Amino acid sequence: MANTILGSTIVFAPYSVDQALEGLAEVGYKHVEIGAVKGWFEHIDADTADDAEISRIQRKLDELGLTVVSLSGHAPLHTVDGKERFKKVMDIAVKLGVKIVNTNSGETESDEDVERFYQHMDEICDYAEARGLTIGLETDSNLIPTAKAGLAVLDRINRPGLVGFNYDPGNVIYYAGADPTEDIEHALPQMVHFHLKDKIGGEKVFHFPALGTGEIPLASLIEQCKEAGFTGPISAEVEFDENGWPSYQECLAAARTSADHLRKIGVLDGSSK
């Protein structure tokens, strides 16, 4: 079974959800991941989006011939506000027919934060299970900087099949200076989603360019996934650099470059408009 290739709306983070979806459709994606991350790429604001807005987004997806496969709803899960916000994202996922919701743990700063994270995860897992959702915990925090470190987190949560890794190779370099071609092997047995992100530079260097223009061997990582039998979604991300997001047309160009690279390595069908 082939992986479903998604375009993440993060490449259009400062722009509207309509502009993001239009751009992803224009460069040839048929499947998308929508961001619902407070203050980061908030194409759906889980705190304010009502049924009318969710229905409007669904009509926009239908108009463009797009299917939403996953939501990014990253929240500080060790806080009550973060826990409740993520539950709202899960409710939106149900309304959109999405089965995978991604998050990070949040930047836990103390032992008490860590304990609250695990307490909240019990409630979050029950909430997800009752709604038929799978949670992808991203390699994206001080608690889960790499898959190798995250194994202990998944072991303690102990909800196999319900919670797994959302693997991000760019993040494991950024947070830990790790080699993603080695680290991904720790993730693959429990991987439910893949944030395919390129990178330039090492640890703590924020530079995530269009796919195929950085230093990560993306085709090799995808081959590792194939060999391990990973059939989950692969979502293409671009987050640019410390200067922030450029103009809409430059974001569109980065999305096109990424889609073209995915076609070049044989994982994305079709062509751009």
Image (cartoon, rainbow, N blue to C red):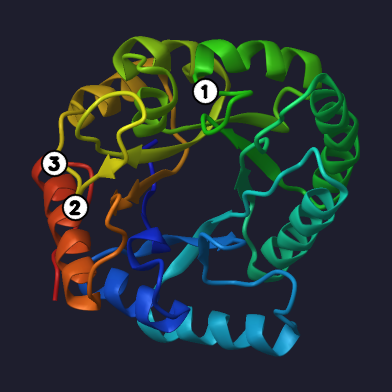
Query: Is the residue marked by circle 1 packed among few (<14), some (14-19), or many (20+) residues within 10 Å?
Result: many
Q: Is residue 225 above or below residue 245?
A: above
Residue 20 in the image, given as x and y percentages of width and height: 37, 74
Label 3 or label 1, whichever lies nearer to me, is 1
Which one is earlier in the sequence, the residue at label 3 or at label 1?
1
- For the residues labelled 3 and 1, say whether their Cβ atoms are less than 8 Å apart: no
Which one is earlier in the sequence, the residue at label 2 or at label 1?
1
Question: In the drawing, does residue 42 fall left or right of residue 202?
Answer: right
Label 2 or label 1, whichever lies nearer to me, is 1
Residue 40 in the image, given as x and y percentages of width and height: 51, 59
Query: Is the residue marked by circle 2 packed among few (<14), some (14-19), or many (20+) residues within 10 Å?
Result: many
- Seen at 67% across and 35% down, the residue is 105
Going by the numbered disc 1, the residue's amino acid type is Pro
**Residue to which mark 2 is pinned:** 258
Going by the numbered disc 2, the residue's amino acid type is Ser
For mark 2, give the secondary structure. helix
Question: In the drawing, does residue 67 fall left or right of residue 170?
Answer: right
Q: Nearer the viewer, residue 149 or 18?
A: 149
- Seen at 12% across and 54% down, the residue is 260
Q: How many marks?
A: 3
**Residue to which mark 3 is pinned:** 212
Q: CA distance from mark 2 to mark 1?
A: 25 Å
Residue 145's label in the rendered image is 1
Going by the numbered disc 3, the residue's amino acid type is Gly
Q: Quadrant of residue 71?
A: bottom right
Question: In the drawing, does residue 39 fall left or right of residue 29?
Answer: right
Q: CA distance from mark 3 to mark 2?
A: 7 Å
- Assign the N terminus to one quadrant of the image: top left
